[in-house]
Amino acid sequence: MVNRLDSSEAFSVPLFDTKSNRGMVNKKLRDDMISAISKCKSIIHFSDPRKAQITDTLNEARRVVKTFNEYQSVVNLDLELLSDSLGELKNLSIALMQRAK
């Protein structure tokens, strides 16, 4: 069934940009960061950590950094592109309002 969707596109975005939604994202990311930092510190203080422990901890740290970067890129958006489009939309709206008079 999924194969039928190969030319489709899907996005998951919050419907409302609210303080509580931002708070949830910030809390989850902060909790993940604190957990990854704690794991890194504990591995550093082990006298002889196993290579697998180091690898797992580094993978967790990379995952958290990747998640942070993804959230940051979503929040920052492409302001230049969007600003140009917003300006064009405003100008066209004004032109339409003038034409409706």
Image (cartoon, grey):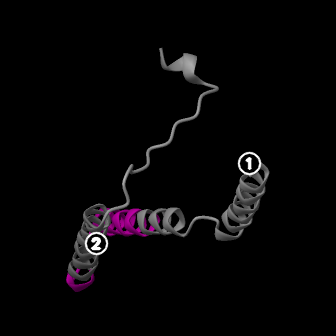
Between residue 55 and residue 78, name the one nearer to us: 78
Task: Name the residue that disc number 2 marks.
Answer: 36
Q: What residue type is labelled 1?
A: Ala
Q: Does the magenta stretch include residue 63?
A: yes
Residue visible at 71% across and 64% down? 81
- The residue range painted magenta reads 44-66
Q: Is the magenta stretch mostly helix, strand or loop?
A: helix
Q: Is residue 4 magenta?
A: no
49 left or right of 101? left
- Mark 1 or mark 2: which is in front? 1
Residue visible at 44% across and 44% down? 12
Task: Name the residue that disc number 1 marks.
Answer: 100
Residue 19: percent from the left, percent from the top? 29, 68
Between residue 33 and residue 90, name the one nearer to us: 90
Residue 77: percent from the left, percent from the top? 58, 65
**Rendered position, 63 above or below 31:** above
The span from disc 1 to disc 2 (Cα, nearest Å) is 59 Å
Helix or strand or loop: what does disc 2 sit on?
Answer: helix
Residue 90 lies in quadrant: bottom right
Which numbered disc, 1 or 2, marks the residue that appears first in the sequence? 2
101 left or right of 46? right
